[in-house]
Amino acid sequence: MNKFRLTLKLLAIAMLTSAFASLAQAQAPRTWVSGTGDDADPCSRTAPCKTFAGAISKTSEGGEIDALDPGGYGTLMITKAITIDGGTGSGWAGVLVQSNNTFIVNTTTGSHANDAVVILRNLSFNGYSQTTGLAGINGINYLRAAQLKVENCQFQNLTTNGIRVSLGTTSGVLTVQDCVFENVNSVITSNATAPAFSVIQFEHNRMVGSSTGLNAQTNTFATVRDCYFGSFTSTNGAVRAGTGSQVNVLNSMIVNNIVGVNVAGGTIRLSNNEFFSNGTAISGTAESANNNKFRGNSTDGATTNVIVVQ
Amino acid sequence: MNKFRFTIKLLAIAMFTFACASLAQAQATRTWVSGTGDDDNPCSRTAPCKSFVGAYNNTAEGGEISVLDPGGYGTLMITKAITIDGGTGSGWASVLVGVMNGITVNISTNGNHPNDAIVILRNLSFNGNSQNPTGFAGANGITYLRGAQLKVENCYFQNLSSNGIRVNLGTTIGNLTVKDCVFTNVNSVITSDATAPAFSNIHFEHNRMVGSTTGLNANSSTFANVRDSYFGSFTGPDGAVRAGAGSQVNVVNSTFVNNNVAANVAGGTIRLSNNEFFSNAIAIAGAAESANNNKFRGNSADGSVINLIGIQ
């Protein structure tokens, strides 16, 4: 055999091999997962990965993970800016939560550690609270990130929270839109340590039971619009404002709850809501624009009409 | 042939067979169905089943059945806590309702959650084929007989000769949530009954329905809340929304148009806030409670309200 040709061949093989190696290790701005994927793959459109955890290590900071087809893509720790879109249609992504947190958002790495944006869209979180031996705690555990956006997600059968916000001494902004919470013990529990604070934009979400709704526990500034709160059974209420917290509630329907809104050391402002068929519609005194409707509650509770109408 | 090797082979075959058998019989937390699946499969992501019935038997209590691709996955009797998600797009699942009920929810007294079971049905289509010329006509899309909570989300109900959802709880209490659903050519959207002191609790939000005969009928011991819904062209005397004996219906931010009767106070209570009643024959039959913020025009008879709803 011609020695020169052999050398060329060897060289070509070596180049090809190193190309594959770099493909497997390089981080791409967009990666893909599939129910039939393999985490040993580069997570490309044609060679997708099997899990979110497999894909995130191959996704560059600020990049996006997309789902190709229906699948259970597993739990995930997020430490950098990222977007995860489960798609709809054939790409609807489900996450089994088993005895732990599904997604933990704790952005501590990369060049945007202090202004990281994390977007979670079109995902389903099922905690399987009625399956023997399984019980998911939190759907999403939000510990650190400048902004977390949760859009068009389904949370169900979780034993603790749909979303747990526990920011400590860093401030964060959480947006929750077009989500459904079903049989989730608490929809959101939010804490921050002053002077840090948690800001929550909560729009067009629907939730029925089980115990507590949106609990702005400490140093939380929440705005609720166009939401449905039904059948929450805890005295914490469907909406609660704790110490150092303010919650604005607009155009929402609050029905069949033990407590509708609970002014528990903070401030709740109400405009154009319906409170029907609750045990106690308002616990404490809420601020009102004199345009909320009350009927069929055991106790309506008190408002002060300090919201300016002009 | 070497006897030892032959024994090893037999052993291997036996082990493989056992492994397969246990795979087929173990119940998984999540199972999958596909239009090209097979109910002899373990209903895994890579070896999906063919029908909801096949998958249901392989799904653990409180588990989930997911849909891989479009298909007709058949009728089902549900007796344990479960979630069924038909997906959307190419994963859209449909149930052809024959001369019986599409999905029946009747949680048995067995299992670990007989009294607090949650059943979630999402992204499903129920077609009763009521206009099939050979007399094929589905009765109810969903029949809800027993179960602490039933959630129906983003489903389509069409061409059903009786009800979209029939709630008939007897002496057990139930909670039904219906969201983002469409009811088209369904004889009655929902008929709900319970025997006091038990009751039926209904959260009915962002649903759209046009005809045919009756809308949401809180027939007995039913407490219903309706928000952001559209009721059009119901032709029956029961009306688009009806509150029968021992029933209360709160109706908010909804549109009632072109109905024979829109809101029918028939022994129970109906509360109205911020609704539009346009172009009905009778907007309100009986007297409804109001917050003095409902709009009426173009009805043959508007009917009467009492402005009892407190405003603060």
Image (spheres, rainbow, N blue to C red):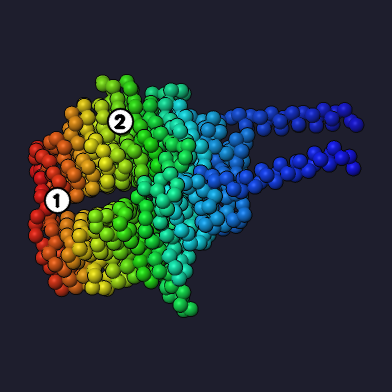
Q: In which quadrant is the N terminus of chain B drawn? A: top right
Mark nearest the camera among 1 and 2 is 1
In the rendered image, the vertical position of residue B118 relative to residue A6, given as above or below = below
What x and y, as percent, mark residue B58?
54, 50
Residue situated in front as seen by the camera: A259 or A227: A259
Residue situated in front as seen by the camera: B17 or A236: B17
Share a chain, discs 1 and 2?
Answer: yes
Q: Amino acid at mark 2?
A: Ser
In the rendered image, the vertical position of residue B138 relative to residue A47, given as above or below = below
In this rendering, would B228 be left or right of A303?
Answer: right
Q: Amino acid at mark 1?
A: Arg
Chain bearing tag 1 is A
Residue situated in front as seen by the camera: B261 or B151: B151
**Secondary structure of the residue carrying numbered label 1:** strand
Residue at the image point whose x is 22% and y is 33% from the top: A241
Residue at the image point whose x is 48% and y is 32% from the top: A76
In this rendering, would B53 be left or right of A151?
Answer: right
Q: Which residue does the numbered mark 1 point to in the structure image? A: A295
Dot placed on the residue nearer the N-terminal end, 1 or 2: 2
- In the picture as drawn, the residue positioned furthest to the bottom comes out as B133
Give the total number of marks visible in the rendering: 2
Task: Give the crowd class for mark 1: few <14, some 14-19, many >=20 residues within 10 Å.
Answer: many
Residue at the image point whose x is 82% and y is 27% from the top: A7
